[in-house]
Image (cartoon, helix red, strand yellow):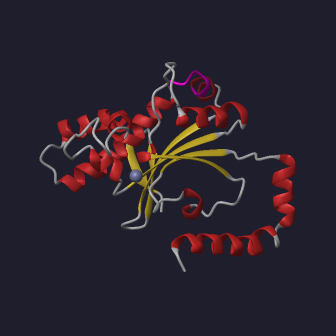
């Protein structure tokens, strides 16, 4: 079976297991629409699918995935702001109560910040400008732990980039307003598939603390 055929078969199995056995749930989701209470910004990395890792049900989480789970700052200039549009939809229309920025270990996007910078050449048109969102985290790592092994710097940068994204979320007026009204909470999480742990950022200790 080819990889593509495997996916088609996967859908067939899913249909039998899910649509047919839980048809009332799916009919409700169609009739009433989606009403997720949580939006998650995750990396496109195939190893860190939030729905699989968090054991989420259909309709439970609104997932926004991009390279390195980054939130860009609010930008009114024209452009195809996919992540910002999805956030706006989640906050203004779905009225989610939580936004989780889910960082992860061994992130290829974050690792690219530690390699040679190539811009404007084939294969590197879009990644460097996008990854520049995480540049403040990279600079912080370079300034505070320049002698640490590269892997340690990369892990720190992955976590730092989550904090940059949390800061950038607050540059959106609609998000800032709801956070101040306490109808929306922001969370920074970090998953390490090397040791199978989830850590959550605690603003009071300024640390990612192991949850599980
Ligand atoms: Zn990643």
Magenta residues (range): 171-175
Position of 197 relative to 139 (above/below): below
Q: Which residue lies at the image location 44% right of the left edge and 36% below the top edge?
A: 165
Position of 164 relative to 75 (above/below): below
Position of 86 relative to 197 (above/below): above
Q: Residue 108, how many percent across, how many down? A: 34, 53
Relative to 105, 40 lies left or right: right
Is 206 or 105 nearer to us in this picture?
Answer: 105
Task: Judge whether residue 183 can be spotted in this image.
Answer: no
Q: Residue 202, how many percent across, how many down? A: 45, 44
The residue at the far front in this view is 122
Q: Residue 85, how many percent across, how many down? A: 59, 33
User: Which quarter of the figure is the N terminus placed in?
Assistant: bottom right
Relative to 77, 8 lies left or right: right
Q: Which residue lies at the image location 58% right of the left edge and 41% below the top edge?
A: 99
Relative to 32, 97 lies left or right: left
Q: Which residue lies at the image location 51% right of the left edge and 21% below the top edge?
A: 78
In the image, residue 55 lies in the stretch drawn in magenta = no
Is 53 or 130 nearer to us in this picture?
Answer: 130
Magenta: main secondary structure equals: helix
Q: Residue 97, how many percent across, how many down? A: 66, 39
Is 31 or 78 nearer to us in this picture?
Answer: 78
**Quarter assignment of residue 72:** top left
The tally of labels here is 0
Position of 50 relative to 79 (above/below): below
Task: Judge whether residue 67 can be spotted in this image.
Answer: yes
């Amino acid at each position: 079976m080819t990889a593509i055929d495997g996916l088609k078969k996967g859908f067939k199995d899913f249909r039998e297991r899910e649509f047919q056995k839980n048809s009332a749930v799916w009919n409700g989701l169609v009739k009433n629409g989606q009403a997720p209470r949580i939006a998650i910004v995750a990396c496109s990395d195939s190893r860190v699918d939030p729905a699989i890792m968090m054991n989420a049900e259909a309709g439970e989480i609104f997932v926004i995935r991009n390279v390195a789970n980054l939130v860009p700052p609010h930008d009114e200039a024209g452009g195809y702001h996919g992540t910002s549009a999805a956030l706006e939809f989640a906050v203004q229309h779905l009225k989610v109560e939580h936004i989780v920025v889910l960082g992860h270990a061994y992130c290829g996007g974050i690792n690219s910040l530690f390699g040679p910078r190539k811009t404007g050449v084939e294969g590197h048109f879009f990644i460097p400008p996008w990854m520049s969102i995480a540049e403040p985290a990279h600079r912080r790592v370079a300034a505070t732990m320049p002698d640490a092994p590269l892997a340690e710097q990369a892990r720190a940068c992955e976590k730092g980039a989550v904090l940059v994204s949390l800061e950038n979320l607050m540059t959106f007026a609609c998000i800032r307003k709801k956070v101040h009204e306490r109808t929306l909470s922001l969370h920074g999480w970090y998953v390490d598939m090397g040791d199978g742990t989830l850590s959550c950022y605690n603003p009071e200790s300024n640390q990612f603390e192991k949850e599980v």
